[in-house]
Amino acid sequence: MATIYEVAARAGVSPATVSRVLNGIAVSPAYADRVLAAAEELNYVPNRTAQRLRRRSSEVIALVIPDIENPFFTALARGVEDRALDAGLSVVLCNSDEQEDKESRYLQVALSEHMAGVILAPASDHPDLDAIVAMSTPVVAVDRSAHGYDLDTVVMDDVASGRTATERLYAEGHSVVACITGPATVETAQNRAEGWRQVFAQRSPGAEPDAYLVHSNYRVDGGQAAMASLRALPEPPDAVFVANNLMGVGAMQALATDDAVGIAVLGDLPFGMFPRPGASVLPLPARELGVTAADLLLQRLNGDIGPARRIVLDSAP
């Protein structure tokens, strides 16, 4: 007896697309015709019990993000949800807390529940997607790449963001601009620090960059600790670029009333939080990331089997 995977191979579409067609969910007419023709050629007979069970999740996608309390990811999630609802899909929100084991557990749930697809902001540069990719479940990486997999990916130009924020501080007259960024294992942290490093090398040629670069967690306490370590240097910086909004809050708290130290933060601050005097807050296109990722996933669910795409959005103005 033919399987759904054989039908998908004959039609040249993903198993998720076959499932949507057989469950009466709209896809492009061309793909629907190919699926129905392949099913007829193979004499495919759906297992009605399994089909009823799959239908419960065939209109559901998983969104796995590192920190729902961060306004950046809240806005990203809103972009995904708005697009998904317009297409008749529901979104299950999963919070990994930057932990690979939690991320893996949520991915296993998405697989076992036969969810239509996954949008993932990976907790590390090399997430374990072997099982879900093997089942041909569409996956889109957002904000961060999933190295080792040929997936649709939507990211920002984080190197340019780091350059822009750092240049802004030097343009204000500061002489040594330090950098507080996220974990060294996270792509966004690496790239934003690289943008800072490029400007630092030009603007502070006599200073050692590694002395002014601090990796920390993407949390308020991480920003506090990193700022304290910079202020304790024998020759502390007179400004700091902070590569994440929550770390930026912590850095501003550590500076307290010291308005002499300049600061530039990437990403909107949490609701009700106002920047300290003289601070620059550079917004990021979080919602646009979510909308774009959802659009790519919807195209896959509607039968697109073309090569993986990588979209890079402009970041800070």
Image (cartoon, rainbow, N blue to C red):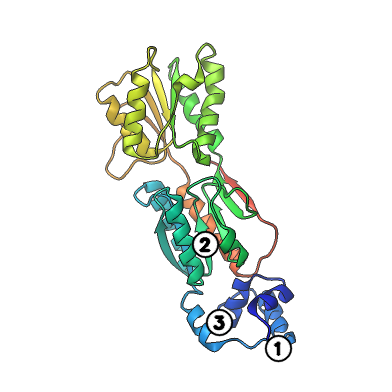
Can residue 87 be seen? Answer: no
Crowd band around label 3 with a 10 angstrom C-alpha radius: few (<14), some (14–19), many (20+)? some
The amino acid sitting under disc 2 is Val
* CA distance for labels 1 and 2: 30 Å
Q: Earlier in the sequence, mark 2 or mark 3?
A: 3
| Disc 1: which residue | 43
Secondary element at image label 2: strand
Q: Quadrant of residue 151?
A: bottom right
Mark 2 near mark 3, Cβ–Cβ under 8 Å? no
* Residue under label 2: 118
Residue 105 spot, x, y in % from top left: 45, 60
Q: Position of residue 73 (x, y in %)?
A: 41, 50
Label 1 close to label 2 by CB (< 8 Å): no
Residue that numbered label 3 is attached to: 23
Q: Residue at x 53, y 65 (%)?
A: 117
**Mark 1 is on which residue type?**
Asn
